[in-house]
Image (cartoon, rainbow, N blue to C red):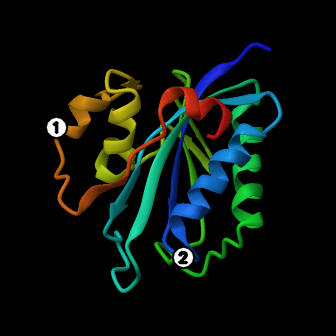
Amino acid sequence: MSATPAYVGLGSNLQDPAAQLKSAFAELAALASTRVVVRSSLYRSAPVGYADQPDFINAVAAIETALAPCVLLDALLDIERRHGRVREFQNSPRTLDLDLLLYGELQLHEPGLTIPHPRMHERAFVLLPLAEIAPQLVIPGMGTVVDQLCKISVDGVMLCEARPARNEQASHP
């Protein structure tokens, strides 16, 4: 399998968000031609946009995949649907949100898919977990994760559950 490194952002604020993310890590690991390399800790963050909702639990997974970007996105949307994701309005509460943040060094803008994710460099709930697992990763066209993190406020985002040790991640993503 010729694999491409990719990064997926995970978020949830409904129906036991930490459990939703842990289940989603396992489902990512079960995708065809894909493996989870490492996952971040879980972070609690205040909602963005629509504020009248519970806090979110967020994380990032580093994967290697042979799936094409659009196929991977479709697989992520399928996982969201299995978790009961309903898109009522922008920034609404959700059982699970999976965002394809990066796919190798690809820069892509197509209907329904933009890589790198267009707002990832503005969001501490993405950059903090990403910096934990890949601080020197280059976001194409923007610079490193830590450089981007230094440009934004991290207020309202806090560690809530440390990631498993590396040897535990292989068997229990």
Q: Position of residue 83 (x, y in %)?
A: 71, 67
Q: Residue furthest bottom?
A: 52
At a point 64% along the width and 20% down the height, the residue shown is 4
Pick whichever, 138 or 154, lies toward us.
154
Does the image show residue 148?
yes
Please, is residue 124 above or below residue 141 in the view? below
Callout in the foreground (1, 2): 2
Please, is residue 159 above or below residue 60 in the view? below
Label 1, residues with CA under 10 Å away: few <14, some 14-19, many ≥20? few
At a point 44% along the width and 42% down the height, the residue shown is 163
Residue labelled with disc 1: 150
Q: Which label belongs to residue 23?
A: none
User: Gap between marks 1 and 2, in whole Å?
Assistant: 30 Å
Residue labelled with disc 2: 14
The C terminus lies in which quarter of the figure? top right
Instruction: Please name the amino acid that badge 1 sits on.
Output: Cys
Pick whichever, 5 or 22, lies toward us.
22
Q: Is 33 on the left or on the right of 169, as rendered?
A: right
Disc 2 secondary structure class: loop
Q: Position of residue 40 (x, y in %)?
A: 44, 40
At a point 59% along the width and 53% down the height, the residue shown is 22
Instruction: Please name the amino acid that badge 2 sits on.
Output: Leu
